Amino acid sequence: MAGFSIDSEMLGSEALPAFSLTLNDLLVTAVYSDTDLQAELVKALRSKTGIPVLDSEDGLYMRLTVENNIAFFHKWFGCTIPLSEILVQFELQYCVKRPLHKCSESEIRRVCYAKYYMSGVQNMVFCEPIQGVDVRTINSFINMLNIMKHQHSAVLILVSSMEHALILGDNAYKLQPNGIQQIEIIEEGAVPEAEILTPKTVKLFKIPAKVDDKIILFDPPEIDYIEGQDGKAVIVINNEKYAMDSTLAEVEKKLEVYGFYRCHRSYIVNLQKVREIITWSKNTYSLRIDNKVQSTIPLSRTRLQEVLDKFSLE
């Protein structure tokens, strides 16, 4: 089994917490952290290891066409896969004659994926590979990850979004100033009976959250979704977060009557705010929220049908 390990001692950065992580070629590993920790980790990986870290435009030739870029790297790396197959695999056949500087960000990103894929490097690190790109590009990246696993390439993905960590990683971890912790992504068949409550009367009108030494009261319709962080619930409204003293299970009981639903182990969504149900390539799902930032949150496979039933969809 191929793979690699990284730890804080190897990386030698005082800005990183003490941690150790072992990756193998059978599972894609994703690490979720804030942007400062992520930048420090990328810097340390580049300076202390020989593992390449993907940069979205690193080494591309912006004045050359998509086809010429792919052809150049195809020859440079001695790739044995036919050029035409590479173009189709990364859905670049529709823009082959377009110079890169006239391509969309998503098209450029797919050229970058193709370049790294053709390099044949066994161990790779990708930093924010699907940030700000379209669904076609995300699917293209996920397909590439599946192929790389079959080719026994160990992959580490660094993201600042928990949703991206859950979409891309077979194993997902959260890197914090006090260390690293695995994110539990085990699918549940049902919510435990102890957590289910069907209220007969509505007594709750405001949801309290803390900001410094103040308590803010929110109307349930204001809330986009609620996320679990370190055992506590966090209200999210237009990407702004407000901490609560309650657990997700406690909040779920109180908000069920207002149309909120436990769509994932770590998320409760306001169903009135759901604009779109997204299906990704590896049978993974997300919900797009109708807010200013168009937030997306994970939807467990086991709960997809329940959500479809709630919207009277087949």
Image (tube, grey):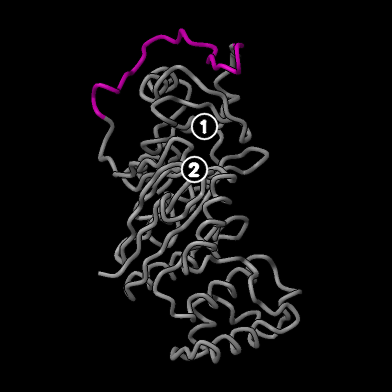
Residue, x 55% and y 89% (percent of image)? 76
Magenta run includes residue 201 = yes
Which residue is at the front of the view, 98 or 38? 38
Which residue is at the front of the view, 131 or 263? 131
What label does residue 259 carry, if any? none
Residue at label 1? 225
Mark 2 is on which residue type?
A: Ile
Residue at label 2? 297
Is 264 situated above or below 202?
A: below
Is 252 situated above or below 155?
A: above
Which residue is at the front of the view, 157 or 285? 157
Name the spot of residue 62 as percent of width and height, x first: 73, 77
Q: How many labels does the image show?
A: 2
**Contact between labelled residues 2 and 1, with CB atoms less than 8 Å apart:** yes
Residue, x 37% and y 40% (percent of image)? 181
Which segment did they paint magenta?
A: 192-214
Name the spot of residue 44 as percent of width and height, x first: 52, 56
Residue, x 30% and y 23% (percent of image)? 196
Q: How crowded is mark 1: few (under 14 residues within 10 Å), some or many (20 or more)?
A: many
Is 92 situated above or below 217?
A: below
Name the spot of residue 153 as percent of width and height, x first: 36, 71
How far, Cα to Cα, is label 1 from label 2?
A: 9 Å
Image quarter in which the N terminus is found = bottom left
Name the spot of residue 105 as percent of width and height, x first: 67, 65
Prevailing SS of the magenta stretch:
loop
Left or right position of 8 against 293: left
Magenta run includes residue 95 = no
Disc with the residue nearer the chain's start (1 vs 2): 1
Mark 1 is on which residue type?
A: Tyr
Is disc 2 placed on a helix, strand or loop? strand
